[in-house]
Amino acid sequence: MHTPHKRTSARRITALLGALLGLALLVLQVQGSASAAPSGLDDPEKKEIAMQIVSSAENSSLDWKEQYDYIEDIGDGRGYTAGIIGFCSGTGDMLDLVELYTAREPGNILAKYLPALREVDGTDSHEGLDPTFTGDWEKAARDPGFQQAQNDERDRVYFNPAVKRGKADGIGTLGQFAYYDAIVMHGDGSDATSFSSIRERALDRAEPPSQGGDETTYLHAFLDARVWAMQQEEAHEDTSRVDTAQRVFLDAGNLNLDPPLDWQVYGDSYHID
């Protein structure tokens, strides 16, 4: 006579277990989404801030999206410097950019300069580029495809490696930005002023958070090493993009690079709300 009640209880237990299982799966999905979400400089809002701060130093403007057509020789031994991140004809990244653009759009206006870009790589020469290259670069910059190629090469060569290395070292948004700005200016080669050498110089003085070190102490060591690297090149001896920008944020304890932000570069003042 009690069998029906036992069956009802069993059904209730089964239903309860099913509900608990569903809740557990939901929690795992939420946690998975949270862990997959960007954290640090790769958060879209923080990435936008990073682009603006770098543009203030590279182009004296916060409007980085207006810099796709920028091109000039700034006399630093790297040939032409151009675009949103300062791709250089003498350092190979401009060549990589035009090769990517040409792979996507074979008939583009810059494709004819590929032989010349290969020849001048590693030098400050304009041979094979002048007198039409700068004008054609400006024309190409109107093409959304070329703009996207600039974005993609910036991320592949500079932004993504900086964020990845920063997260591995246990540093937050500001530290990841310090890495990014260093790679933009110095590249990541094997010479004494490259990003990797700057980082090694910092590691000789302080441990990163991933090794139990204090984040602020480590970042000061990194910025000190960065300043040293900049002082080795006449074209970069003005270190205000570190001293009156990144160091200001660090001294304020703003490790998350949260706005409002106020800084100076080369004597010009900037603000982000």
Image (tube, helix red, strand yellow):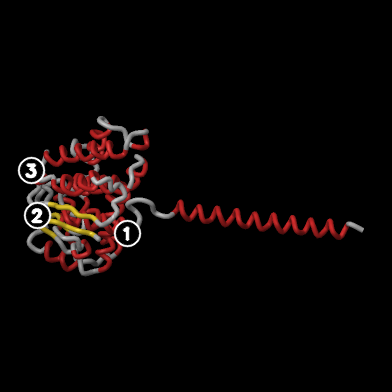
Q: Are the two marked residues, 3 and 2, in contact with CB atoms closer than 8 angstroms? A: no
Q: Secondary structure at mark 3?
A: helix
Q: Amino acid at mark 1?
A: Glu
Q: Earlier in the sequence, mark 3 or mark 1?
A: 1
Q: Secondary structure at mark 2?
A: loop
Q: Earlier in the sequence, mark 3 or mark 2?
A: 2
Residue identified by numbered label 2: 73
Residue identified by numbered label 3: 234
In the picture as drawn, the residue positioned furthest to the front comes out as: 252
Residue identified by numbered label 1: 45
Mark 3 against mark 2, which lies toward the viewer?
3
Residue 50 location in percent, x, y? 26, 54
Q: Amino acid at mark 2?
A: Asp
Residue 257 location in percent, x, y? 28, 51
Q: Secondary structure at mark 1?
A: helix
Q: Which mark is residue 61?
A: none
Residue 256 location in percent, x, y? 31, 49
Mark 1 crowd level (few <14, some 14–19, many ≥20, 10 Å Cα): few
Q: In screen coordinates, is 203 left or right of 74?
A: right
